[in-house]
Amino acid sequence: MIYFANPGKRFLKNKTTETKIIKDVLVSNKYILGDNVKLFEKNFSKFIGSKYAVGVANATDAIELIMNNHNIKNNDEVITVSHTATGTISAIISCGATPVLNDIDDDYLFECKNLKNLVTKKTKAVVIVHIYGQACDFRSIINFCKKRKILIIEDVSQAHGSKIALKRSGNIGDYGVFSLYPTKNLGALGDGGIITMNSKSNFNKISMLRNYGWDSKNLTKINGRNSRLDELQAGILNFRLKKLDKDNLKRIKIAKLYNLKFKNLPIKLPKIGKNFSNVFHLYVIQTKKRSKLLAYLKKNRIFAGIHYEIPNHLHPAIKGKIRFKNLEKTTNISKNIVSLPIYPELSKNDQLKVINNVLNFFKRT
């Protein structure tokens, strides 16, 4: 079976090195917030270009910790998109704030020109989602947000290493939030997350918030929580971070071949930008024949995905806790999107098998 993502192959490729890393952590007697986490925070902030980084348990916690740091709570509003992983929105709801959902543009990204119509006196933050590997160029709204003291949080969970005008995503807004889930461009062996920022005071406070609100003497100074990145994951991530740009180039190469082979088919293809503006966490096409295509691929042992089949504003637990006006594009694309296999370890033969099956499907239909 060829899957749309296959993190197991990443481990097998580096099995000798990563097994040693795991063993070293197990015998170190340091499992939480030790040297590996400190080194990863240092290495990751250097990679992104930020002054600071804080390792946390996952990206959902990361968004919630940021909002707690800025006292975002009941009756406040946070603008983001419906077309994202549920965690983006559930973090906002968990703080008591109201998610205000913006529509997306033709490339699935936050529609910046709509922002002015959504902002109210209650607006405290905007969460920009860089989705599928694409960097959302939100520079046009930075000054607008600064004048109104609206926080900008970049959710870079699907776009590690992407760039906007040669600057890494996650170092353009006030904060960058990254999931380190196993399937991500930079993925661990389990859950994990990291926050980037350039404010020392925010770094110090979020470092406390992720660990019960403790100071250096384990005295609880603020009401925090347990949301820590562990040593084992950090050790693996330090090793994998060194390979991230090269792995992203492999993803882009795979995407280019797909685009070349599929250019004459009746499907919408993703854009391939310059200078890492799209690092292809997912390779997403649109077709009105989605159900039949998925069934055909599955019959031929190719497991494609859908990200995301049900927009967040249609989820039962979210419906009554959000505000939105027009989500036409969000709703329409959810009916047609398909994620085809893409990851650095995808062999040329396996990719050609995917290509040939897609071509054969459209010839038959």
Image: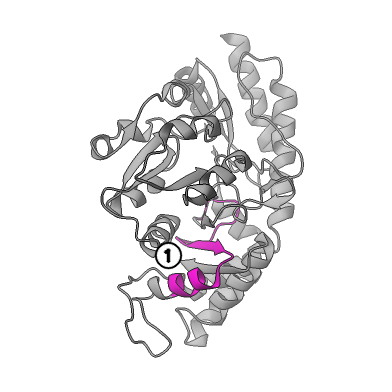
In the image, residue 249 lies at what x, y percent? Answer: 74, 47
The one of 342 and 200 positioned closer to us in this rendering: 200
- Whether the magenta-drawn stretch holds residue 203 is answered as yes
Residue 115 falls left or right of residue 18: left
What residue do we see at 34% from left, 45% from top? 122
Q: Is residue 43 left or right of residue 2?
A: right
What residue sits 44% from the left and 70% below the top?
A: 206
Can residue 200 be seen in this snapshot?
yes
The answer to whether one can see residue 342 in this image is: no
Question: Which residues are drawn in magenta?
Answer: 182-207
Q: Secondary structure at mark 1?
A: loop
- Report the side of 17 relative to 195 (left or right): right
Measuring from the top left, give residue 349's x and y in whole percent: 71, 37
Callout count: 1
Q: Dot 1: few (<14), some (14–19), or many (≥20) neighbours within 10 Å?
A: many
Query: Toward which corner of the image does residue 334 lie, by quadrant?
Result: top left
Q: Is residue 256 above or below residue 159?
A: above
- Residue pictured at 53% horizontal, 80% vertical: 25
Mark 1 residue type: Ala
Which residue was labeled with disc 1?
57
Horizontal and vertical percent position of residue 236 = 58, 68
